[in-house]
């Protein structure tokens, strides 16, 4: 079941000098002193995002699952996933994590291949998929080198994965993103569906990229033919205390959550979609 372990970006435990990375369109990355914090904006507190998220995915998959279990209380994301599950039977879930999308796609008649670079995340997914009515397989692998035959899939989806390239490869995230898109394109058959999901803001009143690097990433997706749909994916936690705990832990939004003082948290998510015939193949 496990095909390949590939982990080129495993983070060290060294804590770096705080830097805030600003990316300008068509220019190299400039690392700057962190600007004055806007305390209502997500992504404003943690400074070493690479280590922060790598540690979570390697060591705290259960807590990650607690967080995402509270998300999408509007059901807007679930209904898009449901549509995708019926649009094709062979589906690849890239960066499957603890299996939130994988589980939504897995149904009788479907064959789902979930891949993730962190075995710990897939261990949680595996337990959750046991009851799924479809066929499924999970592999530890990198999004830029999928262990899947060319044209195998009717559809592929990558949820909250490719945005990490802006933190993990600040100097050349564009090339890494293009490699991942090219791999997605390779494994999906002609006329198939390709979906990328990413954040448009947690704790915000309007949909927008939480930082400039992610805004550039969204534009690059759109340059490659992905069309954006905005989804409302609010969280609802069991209590205000839980919202403070989990938003602080993942997004660094504890202070904001304390002031917000509500177990319901507004959130926007982008769903970018294209068909394989919709763009120049190879991204
Ligand atoms: C925010 S989580 C999203 C998980 C899942 N898609 C979901 O909807 O909850 C990001 C996941 O992407 C994985 N990931 C990050 N970079 C990756 C890469 N280059 N190749 C494969 N997986 C990657 C992480 O290990 C993590 O499980």
Image: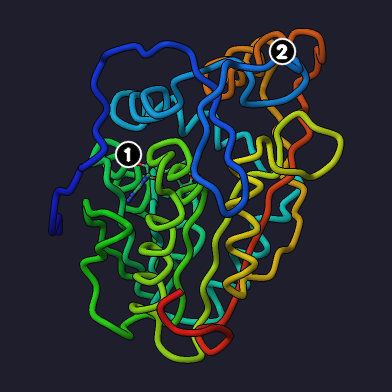
Closer to us: 38 or 24? 24
Closer to us: 109 or 100? 100
- At a point 26% along the width and 38% down the height, the residue shown is 9
Q: Is residue 241 left or right of residue 33?
A: right
Is label 1's Cβ within 8 Å of ligand 1? Answer: yes
Q: Which mark is residue 121?
A: 1
Would you name the residue on which mark 2 appears? Answer: 36
Looking at the image, residue 259 lies above or below residue 28 = above
Regarding mark 2 in the picture, which secondary structure is present there? loop
Looking at the image, residue 54 lies above or below residue 92 = above
Q: CA gap, disc 1 to disc 2?
A: 34 Å
Which residue is farthest front? 27
Rendering coords of residue 122 (x, y %): 29, 45
Q: Place residue 270 in its image quadrant.
A: bottom right
Rendering coords of residue 25 (x, y %): 62, 51
- At a point 57% along the width and 16% down the height, the residue shown is 33
Disc 1 crowd rating (10 Å Cα; few below 14, some 14-19, many 20+) is many
**Nearer the viewer's eye, disc 1 or disc 2?**
2
Disc 2 crowd rating (10 Å Cα; few below 14, some 14-19, many 20+) is few
Closer to us: 181 or 60? 181
- How many numbered marks, from 0 up? 2
Regarding mark 1 in the picture, which secondary structure is present there? helix
């Amino acid at each position: 079941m496990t095909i390949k372990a590939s982990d080129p970006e495993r983070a060290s435990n060294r804590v770096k000098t705080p830097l805030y990375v600003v990316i300008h369109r068509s220019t190299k990355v400039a690392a700057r002193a962190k600007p004055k914090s806007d305390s209502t904006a997500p992504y404003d507190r943690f400074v070493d995002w690479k280590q922060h998220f790598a540690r979570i995915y390697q060591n705290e998959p259960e807590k990650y699952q607690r967080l995402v279990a509270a998300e999408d209380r509007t059901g807007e994301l679930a209904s898009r996933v449901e549509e995708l599950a019926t649009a094709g039977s062979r589906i690849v879930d890239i960066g499957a994590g603890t299996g939130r999308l994988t589980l939504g796609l897995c149904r009788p008649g479907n064959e789902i291949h979930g891949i993730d670079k962190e075995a710990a995340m897939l261990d949680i997914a595996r337990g959750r998929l046991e009851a799924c009515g479809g066929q499924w397989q999970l592999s530890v692998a990198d999004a830029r080198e999928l262990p899947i035959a060319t044209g195998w899939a009717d559809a592929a989806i990558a949820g909250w994965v490719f945005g990490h390239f802006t933190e993990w490869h600040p100097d050349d995230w564009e090339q890494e993103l293009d490699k991942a898109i090219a791999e997605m394109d390779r494994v999906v058959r002609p006329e198939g569906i390709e979906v990328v999901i990413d954040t448009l803001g947690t704790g915000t009143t309007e949909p927008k990229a939480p930082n400039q690097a992610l805004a550039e990433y969204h534009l690059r997706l759109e340059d490659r033919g992905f069309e954006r749909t905005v989804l409302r994916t609010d969280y609802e936690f069991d209590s205000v205390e839980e919202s403070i705990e989990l938003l602080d832990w993942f997004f660094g939004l504890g202070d904001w959550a304390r002031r917000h003082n509500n177990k319901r948290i507004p959130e926007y998510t982008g769903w970018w979609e294209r068909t394989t015939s919709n763009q120049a193949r190879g991204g």
